Image (cartoon, grey):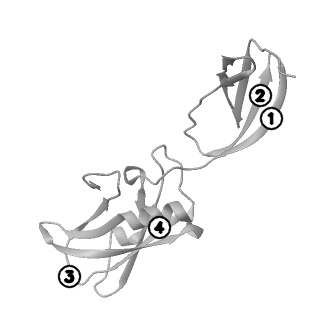
Amino acid sequence: DLYEVDAMQINIVETFETFVVEMEGAAGAGLAEVTLQTAGIYTVQFFFGDTMVSSTKMEVVAGEADVGSTVVYGEGLSSAKAGILATFFMELSDEFGNLVANATTATDFVNDVTATLVKVGDATTTIPVVLEVSIVQEAVKATYTITATGDYYLSLVHTDEATTPATVT
């Protein structure tokens, strides 16, 4: 049997936070929308009045990696020796700061990014940077071998179907 309900409420619960979503609709059917920006496991609770009628778990995962939210760290950013492989890491996050720890999402990012070291004062002198997904470390491993002395800056160019022109940081 379907019952007409005047008010239905959905609670979305994460540790210490509850989002209350009021339903709108008629004859026991309705639509509720909520935008969650923090990745994690949520409990979704459905209430009719004060009575909880259902509860389920929902996982929210990080979105696509965002160049502007990427944290770059490691010794290879501040020093390198000619002819010796240097390494640094890129910790990927989505636009909301959620850590991207999914191999497929990280691989998509690596496939869409070109990393280059560019010599300060001479943009024609560049060194390619090899990117490798290493989810064990929850980061993208970046390596390069430098052969000439000088100061360099890191250029990340992200290109995909939705980015025109490419974004550079």
Query: Dot 3 corresponds to which residue?
Result: 148
Residue 140 image position (x, y, % from top left) = 47, 67
* Of pointers 4 and 2, the one earlier in the residue sequence: 2
Q: Name the mark nearer the viewer: 1 or 4.
A: 1
Which residue appears at 12% of the width and 66% of the height?
Answer: 121
Above or below, 85 relative to 57:
below
Q: Name the mark nearer the viewer: 4 or 3.
A: 4
Is label 2 in contact with label 1 (beta carbons under 8 Å)?
Answer: yes
Q: CA distance from mark 4 to mark 3?
A: 25 Å
Q: Name the mark nearer the viewer: 3 or 2.
A: 2
Q: Amino acid at mark 1?
A: Ser
Quarter of the figure with residue 22: top right
Question: Does dot 3 land on a helix, a strand or a loop?
Answer: loop
Is label 4 in contact with label 3 (beta carbons under 8 Å)?
Answer: no
- Front residue of 158 and 134: 158
* Of pointers 1 and 4, the one earlier in the residue sequence: 1
